[in-house]
Image (cartoon, rainbow, N blue to C red):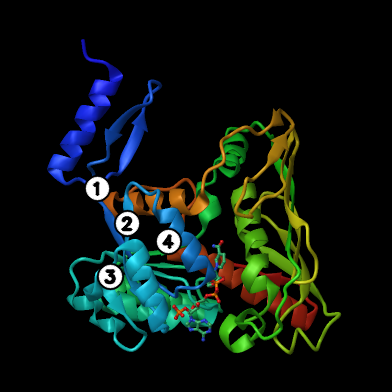
Amino acid sequence: MHTRRDFIQKLTGSLIALQISPALVTAGCNNIIVPYDGPLLRVAIIGLGSYGTRVAEAMKDCKKAKLVGVISGTPSKIKDWQAKYNIPEKNCYNYENFDQLKNNPDIDVVYVITPNALHKDQVIRVAKAGKHVISEKPMSINAKDGQEMIDACKKAHVKLLVGYRMHFEPKTLEIIRMRKVGELGKVLFFQGLCGFTIGDPTQWRLNKQLSGGGSMMDIGIYAINGARYMIGEDPIWVTAQETKNNPEKFKEGVDETIQFQFGFPGGAVASCLSTYSMNNLDRFFLNGEKGYAELYPSTGYGPIQGRTSKGELTQPHVTHQTVQMDEMAGIILEGKQPVVPVDGEEALKDLKIIDAIYEAVKTGKKVDLKL
Ligand code: NDP
């Protein structure tokens, strides 16, 4: 009689014999482990900083995506990553020579995880090298640059995706499902509170040349994007007000705190806050005629927690970046359609809204949006 242990031992033996990478999936309710034998997305990361490291670690558990290359300005990091992730020398580049990616058939996609203002040129260079590209958020520092990135990727016939990891998060997706099937009734209000107290005043996030702005570019974008996927519409107007208590730390063009409001075509309104000067601000609240949904925390690395008028949300915690990269492999390699888009056009809408928020702050006027 064949036992489950025999089966798994045989399976492991076959895997070794076949030299298949140990990408295993648990199938069905009997926890039978089966190998994943579909296509593998081979990824290189540009910018081996704090978030790049998080993505690389999370990718160890991916079954459809694998870290195979690096692009960095710091030779010592390249050596460390080569050793840690078994990256061959031929897949290592610096900022001067990464256009040579065009001659490397072993890399499918490059994930840009550098300071915001660098995304545009790097994404365009990657596209010109004929590789698909994932950009971190914000895709760029204004809508004009974002459009140029989209155009360059279209011209090069490569896909452009943006690291919107919440678009794959199970509790977030459950609220979107509830709203779509009408369990919340007509949605009338969204509140998005996003912020943290930022430290070191010399970091790139507080340098307009590299960040393109302040808290809005970095963390406020979660409330903007969240308002859109929670309500399921794009806003048609925005108003915004800035508060700056520390002009020493938050220099000209680097916003400290902005409150902003949206109006939506279906009649809903949103009220949001983006700040670099308050902790414990990571909360979404969605209110409809038949019910509500709340996430707190709503966009941190998790576990995301929340409840709706039907009770606690119990979907499992997942490592966001692992799921994101597996899902993006499906999008790039198999043309899979995500529930909420993660493409350049989706990111461009957020950039148009950010431009409009800065304009509303400057003019004190309501700004109409056409997304
Ligand atoms: P870090 O400062 O930790 O890392 C950025 C890396 O970019 C550096 O380590 C460096 O890597 C490279 N780099 C190239 N040029 C410069 C430069 N002039 N100044 C500083 N670094 C440079 O930043 P994060 O990793 O926190 O953020 C990177 C991007 O990821 C941002 O766009 C941010 O918005 C986004 N992000 C997204 C998150 C999400 O949850 N989706 C979370 C956190 C960040 P090297 O030495 O290898 O060249």
Mark 2 in CB contact with mark 1 (< 8 angstroms): yes
- Relative height, residue 80 to residue 320 (above, below): below
Q: Amino acid at mark 3?
A: Lys
Number of other residues with Cα within 10 Å of mark 4, as a class: few under 14, some 14 to 19, many 20 or more:
many
Identify the residue position indicated by label 4 in the image: 56
Residue named by callout 2: 66
Between disc 3 and disc 1, the foreground one is 1
**Residue beneath disc 1:** 21
Residue 131 badge: 3
Q: Nearer the viewer, residue 35 or 289?
A: 35
Q: The residue tagged with tag 1: helix, strand or loop?
A: loop
Q: What amino acid is found at the position of numbered circle 1 in the picture? A: Ser
| Amino acid type at mark 4 | Ala
- Looking at the image, the residue that sits furthest to the right is 245
Towards the viewer: 4 or 170: 4
Q: Secondary structure at mark 2?
A: strand
Q: Are marks 4 and 3 in contact (CB under 8 Å)?
A: no
| Up/down of 136 relative to 334, above or below | below
Labels 3 and 1: the sequence-earlier one: 1
User: Is residue 359 in sight in this rendering?
Assistant: yes
State how far apart marks 1 and 4 are (Cα).
17 Å
Between residues 87 and 45, which one lies in front from this camera angle?
87
